[in-house]
Amino acid sequence: MKKEFGIIGMGVMGKSLARNFASKGIKLALFNRYEKGSEELVAQNFIAEYNELSSASGFEDLKAFVNDLSTPRKILLMVKAGDVTDSTINEISSLLEPNDIIIDGGNSHYKDTAQRIESLKEFGIHFIGSGISGGEEGALKGPSVMPGGDKESYEKIAPFIEKIAARDFNNKACCSYIGKGGSGHFVKMVHNGIEYAEMQLIAEVYSLMRFGLLLDPNEIASLFKRWNEGELSSYLLEISSEVITKKDDGEWLIDIILDQAGNKGTGSWTSIAAAELGVSITMINEALFARYISAFKEERVKAQNLYDTDNSSEIFDLNIDQIHDAYKAARIINHHQGIHLISAASNEYSWDLNMPEIARVWTNGCIIRSTLMKSLIKVLKSTDRILLSPEIISEIKNSIDDLLEVTAIAILNRHSIPCLSAASNYITAYINAQSTANIIQGQRDYFGAHTYKRKDDNSGKSYHTDWS
């Protein structure tokens, strides 16, 4: 009997997703490339490991894999983004027929996805670019899935994809048709950007408590666990309490881990997209650049010695409640910036994205799932500018002073807090009608005759001044 669904790529995510599909009763064909001495019989050996895969078929021959699938074929690619994805598509498309569907579940760039959709139309092959979030555990137990492409194709794969997705608070799949073109991968990209800033914020809060208030990891973890029982509850906060209390040979593992953060590119893609669309995502940018500066470990050690930096300052004049509220405010600002970017892309590319539905899809399965995300579903039904929502305005008014004070005290104590600082600067600028841009416009007109507009003229007319 022909198989219902195919997966190409038996890496960590591919294998976890395969087990998830199989556990839901879906008959699978699995493919992994053959590399003599390193990748041999990967799919076949994987199938033999797990009872739920007993009805699956494993292949190293792509033509045999394709022939084992019922039509229209539905094939999920779980391979490395970029050239590997392109070469896999090129190889498999020659074996497919019109109306077959390829689903790219990797972290591909949204512009690449849009291009692939168009190029495969020539052959009558449908292409879905789908963000999948949740890591290895999420892929196995239920990820958040963000498919984009043409809606007709999504409806054909929905019975399979929605079956393996996480469930929300109403037991509905955390999977929904996102929109046209590369919108699915764009939304996943911004998800990852928000994730960057959320992770950096937790790292900064930990650092303030550990080195500013001189709490030990157990004390900080207890606070994180208490926070996680209320409005600050999130998956990332939950796992952080475990990360900071893990021991290795009697020592805190967190103190042994080298302080150089990795990244796989989606953070920088988010920053570039924001620059192209003219949206300020300062917190995501700072989280990304914090990872970049962490890479220069040897140089930072040298600089500390040269500048004779004293890291043993007195306890900061802060309390836990202030840090709690500063963290709360910064998280709201981070989500505001990310949602603003998605909204701007929706308008620019005519995707007509459903913002409350995107928030709902992010309430479970994904890395940035949280109590805040659940509350944003209602907020986004009335506005895609979170900071203009009456409920959010009240939250920010109650916490902005603590955000600003925590930022100021940390900086005065020479304590690096890039994301909290970015949140403070952003909200201060956002809620002030007067910016410094009039000076910039005057300077631009002076050296480049770029012109400017006037407050006392609403006609839209541009002015130039002979400044000399």
Image (cartoon, rainbow, N blue to C red):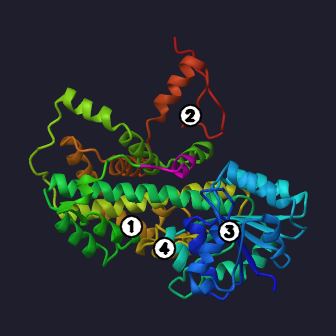
Residue 267 sits inside the magenta stretch: yes
Within 10 Å of the Cα at label 2, are there few (<14), some (14-19), or many (20+) other Cα atoms?
A: few
Of residue 64 and residue 287, the one placed in the foreground of this image is 64
Residue 213 sits inside the magenta stretch: no
Q: Pinpoint residue 286: horizontal percent, then vertical percent.
A: 41, 46
Q: Quadrant of the N terminus?
A: bottom right
Alpha carbon distance from label 3 to label 2:
45 Å
- Residue type (three-letter) at the residue carrying disc 1: Leu
Q: Pinpoint residue 321: horizontal percent, then vertical percent.
A: 21, 65
Alpha carbon distance from label 3 to label 4:
20 Å
- Residue type (three-letter) at the residue carrying disc 4: Glu
Q: Is mark 1 on a helix, strand or loop?
A: helix
Q: Which residue is label 2 attached to? A: 454
Q: Which residue is label 4 attached to? A: 137
Q: Is mark 2 on a helix, strand or loop?
A: loop
Q: How many labels does the image show?
A: 4
Q: Pinpoint residue 442: horizontal percent, then vertical percent.
A: 51, 25
Q: Which residue is label 3 attached to? A: 147
Question: Which residue is rendered at x = 47% and y = 76% of the image?
Answer: 374
- Pick whichever of labels 3 and 2 is earlier in the sequence: 3
Does residue 219 sit above or below 340 in this rendering? below
Of residue 81 and residue 92, the one placed in the foreground of this image is 92
- Pick whichever of labels 1 and 2 is earlier in the sequence: 1
Of residue 172 and residue 347, the one placed in the foreground of this image is 172
Q: Is mark 4 on a helix, strand or loop?
A: helix
Q: What element carries label 3?
A: strand
- Pick whichever of labels 4 and 1 is earlier in the sequence: 4
Question: Which residue is rendered at x = 13% and y = 53% of the image?
Answer: 317
Within 10 Å of the Cα at label 1, are there few (<14), some (14-19), or many (20+) other Cα atoms?
A: some
